[in-house]
Image (cartoon, coloured by chain):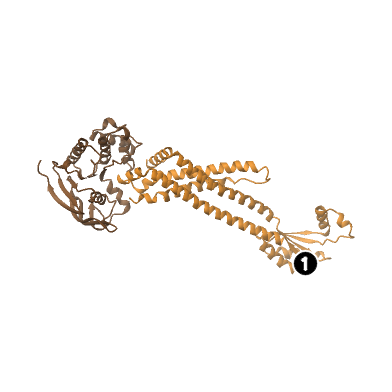
Amino acid sequence: MKLGYGVTEAFRSIRRVPLMTTVSVGTIGLSIMVFGLFLLVTYNVQGAVQELRAKVDVEAYLEEGISGGALSLLRAEVATVPGVEEVRYISKEQARARFVADFGDTLLSLIEGNPLPASLLIVLTEDRRTAEGAAAVAEAVTSMEGIDDVVYGQGWVKRFDRLVLALSAVSILIGLVVSLASMFVISNTVKLTVWARRDAVEIMKLVGATDAFVKLPFFIEGTFQGLIGAALALVILYSLYGYVSPGLGGIVFLPLSVSGAVLAMGAVLGGIGSQVGIKQFLEV
Amino acid sequence: MALVQMFNVSKSFGAVLVLEDITFHIDRGDFVCLTGRTGSGKSTLMKLIYMEEKPTTGQIIVEGFHSDRIKHRQVPYLRRRMGVLFQDFKLLRERTAHENVAFALHVTGTHRRDVRSKVTRALTRVGLGHKRNALPDELSGGELQRVALARALVNDPVLLLADEPTGNLDQDSGRGMVELFQQVNLQGTAVLMATHNVALIEKLPARRLHLSEGRLVEQGVEESL
């Protein structure tokens, strides 16, 4: 009964001031679209970083002429280092084949014999695929008997970590700013709506409507506007994605759960904004 | 027990003292006229009774609600016990007479099933049963105030507060309004009517209170009728 009344009044108000509703939905949609765009970029960059992270590994070059027994011992020893998932042996021949595959055989044909050393390719557990993780494993392995040198992609791993951190921070910041801005916009729009209906609010208070009853239609209106605004933002974002994705191979759209969360965010912001907007009119 | 009791009530806004040391009461079934020129504090006195304002000093008890102790969330329940009328009617322009009266029932949570019969009864009581579907723009000033009266009465109040209810009406409509108040009063609702039009209430058998420079003077019951 109460909810039915709230819904009736909310839609009555939307019909009465369609322009205000359009402006409000449009502004909410625009702010959420900016947020969604950053979410989309962050989501895709993070996906790419995950893929690159899988390639963060450590390679330990072995001293020349290491014996079979010493090698087995060394492999077992490396495998016990925390953060090591797998240890793969790459023989001199395999190293040569890998080099030829990457750079061709012109260079090697000029040199007699095989100058490439055998090595242990150390695959890291997922949580250690960062600059610090790789450095720690490299340090533990470098002093072991039979190891000549240890390399890992120090430079680019560090740069990637910084990029991911920066992007996450920017996304959170934009999310916060957009949330506050949307709430501000919605609460101000509701203030205008309440102003347009201040006579009704005044009468409601005079005949003994409780605050909750006065707020209800505005809450429904705000939530509805937020929901529609967010849906609009997602539709525009998806069209935009469809337009640019053929040119940017491999990018993906926000998964259903994240899209749902964006919708929910619009609704919640709309609802909260409306309650902030009406507060000052309830003091009669 | 008295319906409204005021004890040494003063009210000031900033440095301006509007009401000073007011003590009076209204009993159930009373008809009280409050006179005084414009700006003498009649509206403020009304607002103190429906607790839109709180007294600066002194105390008010209305239907058991105490001005010192009432909580913000209790005020709506006090207001449901009374009906309020204003000079400017305060009707919603885009709603019909029926919808305007029904509004007071909807927002106080009356069941939809009961609304229609209650509204019809209230409109019939003020003689507007036949204009239930008229919009405010299609009604005269007297009719508008009667719709407002129907809305004030629809919740069966124990007290009707009328703040300059005839201020925007011609002489005849004004008299018609006062007659309606008398009928309402005869059916048991106490009435407090504020007006600066002394001629209108000259022959009314009612208690007289007069506000002058913030002070209240009881003038006794008019006994000419």
Amino acid on which disc 1 is placed: Ile
Q: Answer above or below: position of A150 versus B184.
A: below
Mark 1: secondary structure:
strand
Residue A170's x, y, as percent?
A: 58, 55
Q: Residue at x 37, y 49 (%)?
A: A281
- On the rendered image, what quadrant is the N terminus of chain A found in? top left
Q: Quadrant of residue A133?
A: bottom right
Q: Nearer the viewer, residue B30 or A31?
A: A31
Toward the top, the furthest residue is B130
Q: Colour of chain B?
A: brown
Q: Which x, y percent locates residue B11? A: 25, 56
Check disc 1 and report the residue beneath it. Answer: A147
Residue A44 in view of the camera: yes
Residue density around tag 1, few if under 14, some if 14–19, many if 20 or more, within 10 Å: some
Report the front residue among B135 and A238.
Answer: B135
x and y, in percent, of residue A55 in the image: 71, 56
Q: How many marks?
A: 1
Can residue B1 be seen here?
A: no
Q: Residue at x 12, y 46 (%)?
A: B221
Residue at the image position 29 percent from the left and 48 percent from the top: B77
Eyeballing the image, is A106 above or below A70? above
Taking the view exactly as shown, the residue that stands out farthest to the left is B224
Lateral position of residue A114 relative to residue A123, left or right: right
Left or right? Give the position of A266 relative to B190.
right
Q: Which chain is orange?
A: A
Q: Nearer the viewer, residue B93 or A209?
A: B93
B218 left or right of A55 in image: left
> How far across and down, in percent of the image, does residue A151 sit?
75, 63
Subunit bearing disc 1:
A
